[in-house]
Image (spheres, rainbow, N blue to C red):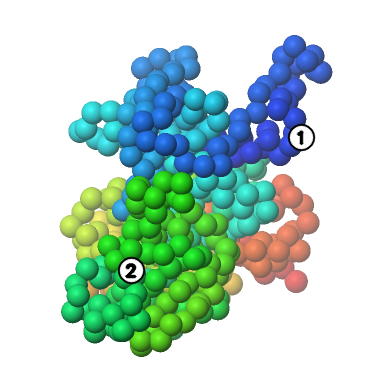
Amino acid sequence: ANGDSNADAAVMEGVASNNSNSNTATDPASNGNNNNVTKLLTLSTGLPKLDENVTCVGFPQGGTQISVTRGVVSRIDVDSQYVLRIQIDAAINPGNSGGPVFDEQGQVVGIASSHLRGAGNIGYIIPSKIVSNFLQMCKDNDEVKVEDRFSGLGALVVQEESIEDSKHVPGISNLAILGSQTLESKALRHNLGLDELDILGGVRIVGSLNNNNNDSFHTGDRLDGDDVLLSINGIPIGMDGTIQLSETRPDERINFRSLVTCQRVGSKVTLDVLRKKERKELSVSLNMSRFLVPQYDDFDAIPLYVVVGGCVFTPLSLPLVSEKKSNKSASFSRYYRDQRSGNEQMIVLSKVLNDEVNVGYHGWKNLVLKSVNGFEPKNIQELVDVIVRKMEGEMMNFRCTVVGEQDADYVICMSEQEVIHSENRVLQRHMIASWCSMEAISKELRDEVEKNEPSETKRRNAYHTMKDMRHVLERV
C-alpha cells in the first residue's frame, strides 16, 4: 500500500476504538451537538464475491472535492509477494490510495492501493482482513526495531504529534522459505513418497531461509528444503500450489501462501509436512521478512543518515537505489533478497557534499562502508556511536569498498579538527538541519545525553551537530 493508506487506516481505527459500542461518534468540533455526528466505518469480515458491486471513495487528482467511482469485483488473487489482493474495475487514480472501498451493505471491503499502468480499469485494493491485522497490531502496541523499519513487506507507520514518536508496526508474515515447487510430475511425487501414502496434494519446499543459521525468523518448528507441505491449519494444498478461497467458494482457488500473509506477525500456524517420507505436524510462529536491503520506505519517511565532513552515509535500500538510477547501483542487486541474522545494515556512502574539507573525494558515491578508524559498525546507530564516543587520533579514516571488489580498499581520510570546524558550514550550505537523523541515535546514547544535559532545549540543540553531542557526552 502507499504511505497515505497507512494514515487513513490508522485514523479509522482511532475513531472505532474510542466508540466500540456505538455506530456513531460525536464530532469533537460539534461541542456535544448530536446533530453533527460522524458515522463509524465497519470493516467487512469476509471477502466480496466476484461481480459484486463496490464503491471507491477518495480524493484523486483532478479536483478538490471527494470523488466516488463504482465498479465490480473482477478477481481475487495474490501479488508478487503472495499478499492477498482484490482487483476491481472502479477507477483508482493517483490520490485514491488509502481511501475506503465499500460493498453494497456499506461495509469496508478494502483500502484502495494501486492501479495497473497501461491497462484500462484494473485497480487493486487491500482486503479488510489484512487491514484489520495491522490495526490490531497497532492497537496492541506491536513495534519493530529501527533496523527492521521497512525491511519487511507492508510496514505500517503510525504518525504521532512528534515525528520522533512515530510507531512502526510489523509488516507481512511469511514462511521463511526460498520458494516452492508444484508437484504435477508423477515421477517426482513417487520419488518423494507421496504415492505410497496415497497423498494427492502438496508442494515441495525448494529451500529455507533458516539454512544460514538465521534465528531471527521463527520460533518453534521450521520448514526445510525438500519438505512437502501438505496443509496449513488443516486447509489442504493442491499439487498446483493452490487452496480453496473458502469453504463456501470451493471453485475459486488461490496461492497457498495467502494463508500465511493474511496472518498477523506472531501468529502460530500448524503445518502438515512430509519429511523424508514421514508425516510430521509442525507448529510455526510467524514473523516478518527481514531483508538486509529494505524493500520499501514510507511517504514522508525521515531517512536514516549521518553527515561527517560532507560525506553522507545511509543504510542501503531499494528506494535509494531507484532514486540514484546509476549502473553502480545495479551491482547491489546481489543483496536484495538476503535476510539479516541480527541487527546489521549495509551502510553505504550515498554521496559527498563538496566542500574544502573533502577535496579529493568529490563525486564518490555508492561505496560500502567497511570501517571507521578500525571500528566496524554493523548499523547506522553503531556508526553514530563510534563517531561521537570512540574516535581517537588526529585523523578520521573511513574505509570503503566497491560491491564485487571486497579486496579493494578505498580510504577517505580527513582531519578531525577540520571536520569539526567545517560542520556548520557544510550543513548550512546544503540546508541540512542536523548532522544525523534522530533515529540514527540509539536509545542508550540518547539516555546518556539526557543524563548529562538536563535542559531539554540545550539537549535538542546538542543533537544538531557532532561537535555539540561530543561536548555533552564528555561531561563528567
Looking at the image, which residue is at 49% across and 35% down? 109
Q: Position of residue 250 (x, y in %)?
A: 39, 50
Please state, as top left, top right, bottom left or bottom right, where the N terminus lies in the image.
Answer: top left
Examine the image and state in which quarter residue 190 appears. Answer: bottom left
Residue under numbered circle 1: 21
- Residue extending furthest top? 35
Amino acid at the residue labelled 1: Asn
Q: Residue 466: in sight, yes or no? A: no
349 w.r.t. 169: above or below: below
Looking at the image, which residue is at 70% across and 50% down? 458
Q: Secondary structure at mark 1?
A: loop
Examine the image and state in which quarter residue 94 appears. Answer: top left
Q: Residue 115: in sight, yes or no? A: yes
Q: Nearer the viewer, residue 163 or 268?
A: 268
Sequence-wise, the earlier of marks 2 and 1 is 1
Q: Nearer the viewer, residue 368 or 239?
A: 239
253 w.r.t. 113: above or below: below
Looking at the image, which residue is at 56% across and 50% down? 133
Looking at the image, which residue is at 55% across and 26% down? 106
Residue under numbered circle 2: 201
Nearer to us of marks 2 and 1 is 2
Please state, as top left, top right, bottom left or bottom right, where the C terminus lies in the image.
Answer: bottom right
Q: Secondary structure at mark 2?
A: loop
On screen, residue 338 versus residue 445, left or right, reads left
101 w.r.t. 406: above or below: above
Amino acid at the residue labelled 2: Gly
How many residues crowd around disc 1 within 10 Å: few (fewer than 14), some, or many (20 or more)?
A: few
Q: Position of residue 465 (x, y in %)?
A: 56, 55
Circle on res. 468? none
Q: CA distance from mark 2 to mark 1?
A: 45 Å
